[in-house]
Image: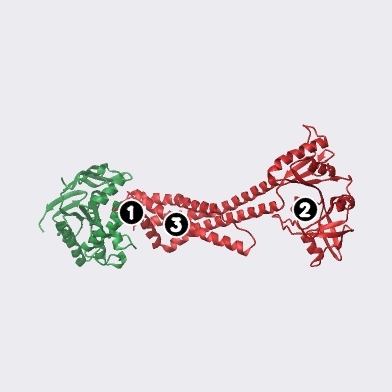
Chain colours: A red, B green
Amino acid sequence: MIDFHSTFNIAIKSLRINKMRSALTSLGIIIGVSAVIIMLGVGSGASNRISNELSSMGTNILTVRSGSSTSGGLRMGMGTQQTLTVKDAEAIVKNCKSVLYVSPYLAQSKQVTYSNQNWATSINGIDKTYMDIKDWTIALGRNFSQEDINNNAKVALLGNTVVTNLFGDLDPIDKTIRIDGIPFKVIGALNSKGQLGMGMDQDDVIMIPYTTAQKRVFGTSFPGAVSTIEVKVRDVDNIARAEQEITELLHLRHKIGKNQENDFSIRNMTEMVKSMQEATKAMSILLGSIASVSLLVGGIGIMNIMLVSVTERTKEIGIRMAIGATSVDIRVQFLIEALLLSIAGGLVGVAIGLLVSKGIATFTSTSVIVTPFSIFLSLGFSALIGVIFGYYPAYKASLLNPIDALRYE
Amino acid sequence: MALIEVKHAIKTYTSGDTSFNALDDVSLTVEEGEFVAIMGASGSGKSTCMNLLGCLDKPTSGSYFLDGIDVLKLKTDELSLIRNQKLGFVFQGFNLISKTTALENVELPMIYKGIPPEERRIRAKKALKIVGLEGRESHMPNQISGGQQQRVAIARAIVNDAPLILADEPTGNLDTKTSIEVMNFFVELNEKMKKTIVLVTHEPDIAEYCKRVIRFQDGKIISDEVRKR
């Protein structure tokens, strides 16, 4: 019969006799568990940040892109042929019920100058609805008017990064900048949206009317052709329906038969969010498994010390057996010792992991999110390791022959 | 019914092609309340006999009944139970668990018997009082003398109320004066507490304390005499 309470006390006593050794043995588990918690925390922090950024780009957005062109049998990829037109955009907002806004979108990188400053940035040709589609807000000045669009007005809205680089602290409104040598009047500045995870600066941008972009700046060969149409859907749940409506409409307008290849593609932001989240999840798992290796190494440390301990305490085991301990008593005693080492290590590891995560979050801009799941996971894992790596030494101890064990010096 | 009943016990050790009988057809009966000394030179088989009597080992052939229980039929863990409840061991090297207090050492057999902590404490204190170690409960083995350590071991042997006490050279590590003290304890245990004691020794002076002396030679019993003290 096993008296767990007493066996537990015996185990605690043996661990306290070798305080230093017990502490060092637990250290492996402490490092392992805190590493798992920190790694998972950093991972979920990153994934959280990325999904926030992606939603700052807008989630209920569809991007319709022109199809691929074929040049001597080589298909050049989506967007290389401008099969979409401004008329398509107008038809989409008119005919598709789940669509709220559309905006043609064309972009090129150009050199911009103001006074003696110059800066290379992305010039986006857009409609005035683009602000609502991508959740841009105006910090200073005003948005484009319908007149600006209709008259191919040479007016521009500047992103925060561009303002800083061209104007410094000066007020940019009503100043004249030159894009590829063409003068543009600055009518507004945009609020900052910050960087994307991949180091893309969303604020390094100049907006101009798409009509102006087509006719005055980019010099498109087909007037009215656009590479991209950005679409805002009424709400996230309608995305699939909107996609279907647009596809049907464009089939009709482009005279594409059932078995023909589309000359456009529709990209869905939620899919991108999903794939990014999956990528960060994969990263979390990777980080977590690297950290688990150290937990495993800690477990091997426990096994090592327990084996030493069993050999060292052979005589003690012999005495216990002689006065009536069964092999189960001995096994349970050593198993509890291993478990105590790993669980105590696990608890200290959780505390250290939480502290370090907090430290990382405070002293760097990285967000670290420790979930209860990661705490339970690493605690459970460390207990499991205690059982797995404690079992063999305990089993070995229980197999000792009391006569030989008593004679051991 | 005899407390110990060994019949035609043979213990054979084999190493390679040669085998050797450490016990060669030993039959032995010890009644309850006896105080027996087992004597013999080293290698005479007295230690092997003690291991058999102490249920630490089983004979190769023959039979052993302890308090009516057929020991040969028991499994390893059942032997542990018998050792716990029927036997008390006193060893030459004391064999206390180091860095563990006298009281905890005495409590140990009761832990494996499953006695609750409060009762354990009371009984262990009582046993230590019997061996004259009142007030030394919290001493570690390395903080007390050899004679005191052996008395802790005796307290541990009697605390579970086992009928039989097996002592293997209990005075081997003690000086003469302490040896006399410890032996007087054994006499007291035998006479006052009616414990059956089997004691291995090679010192005739120690055997003087016992009522019956069995001599071993080459694995056989060569003499078995009852004497008056």
* Disc 1: CA contacts within 10 A as few (<14), some (14-19) or many (>=20): many
Q: Chain of mark 2?
A: A
Q: Residue at x 34, y 52 (%)?
A: A3
Which numbered dot is residue A405? Answer: 1
Q: Nearer the viewer, residue B124 or B202?
A: B124
Q: Which residue is mark 3?
A: A341
Q: Is residue A276 left or right of residue A132?
A: left
Nearer to us of marks 1 and 3 is 3
Which numbered dot is residue A159? Answer: none
Instruction: Give the quarter of the figure containing the N terminus of chain B.
Output: top left
Q: Residue at x 47, y 59 (%)?
A: A26
Q: Chain of mark 3?
A: A
Residue type at the position of mark 1: Ala
Residue type at the position of mark 2: Met
User: Residue A35 location, x and y as percent?
Assistant: 55, 57
Nearer to us of marks 1 and 2 is 2
User: Residue A80 location, x and y as percent?
Assistant: 82, 44
